[in-house]
Amino acid sequence: MNVKMEIIGLVPPCKRCKQTEENARKAAEKLKKEGVDVVVEKLDIMSPEVQDRFGVLMSPSVVVDSVIRINGKVPDRRVMERLIRDAL
């Protein structure tokens, strides 16, 4: 079971973007113990490729398996876990 989670935010990251990425990594670590492989990747919101792919976003944004799930909020670890489970 593989899930790709992309955290879109500023580079260098602001406090909110850092917290979102940290929460995503904690959720991935917890679910790894259950046999779920989660790849967490950080993307720059100012990148032309990211803007072309996702359009206008608010940071931080969370994308799970190419679907924008959260935009402009900092989800906690439990919310991240639920997003990953929903993608399975």
Image (tube, rainbow, N blue to C red):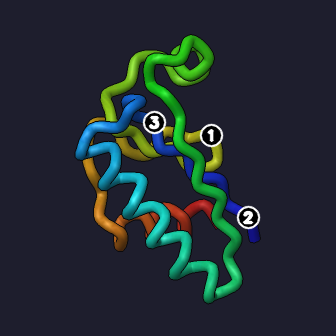
Extreme residue toward the bottom, this view: 33
- Which residue is at a point 45% across and 71% down the rendered structure image? 26
Q: Please tell me which of labels 2 and 3 falls first in the chain.
A: 2
Name the residue beneath numbered marker 3: 8
Gap in Å between the C-alphas at discs 2 and 3?
19 Å
Kind of residue indicated by mark 3: Ile
From this view, report whether residue 62 is shown above or below residue 24. Answer: above
From this view, report whether residue 74 is shown above or below residue 51. Answer: below
Kind of residue indicated by mark 1: Ser
Q: Please tell me which of labels 1 and 2 falls first in the chain.
A: 2
Compared across the picture, whether 8 is left or right of 52 comes to left
Compared across the picture, whether 45 is left or right of 54 comes to left
Q: Indicate the position of residue 1 as horizontal and vertical percent values.
A: 75, 71
Disc 1 packing (10 Å; few <14; some 14–19; many ≥20): few
Kind of residue indicated by mark 2: Asn
Q: Indicate the position of residue 87 as horizontal and vertical percent values.
A: 60, 60
Gap in Å between the C-alphas at discs 1 and 2?
13 Å
Disc 3 packing (10 Å; few <14; some 14–19; many ≥20): many
Q: Please tell me which of labels 1 and 3 falls first in the chain.
A: 3
Name the residue beneath numbered marker 2: 2
- Which residue is at a point 31% across and 28% down the rendered structure image? 58
Which mark, by number, is residue 15? Answer: none
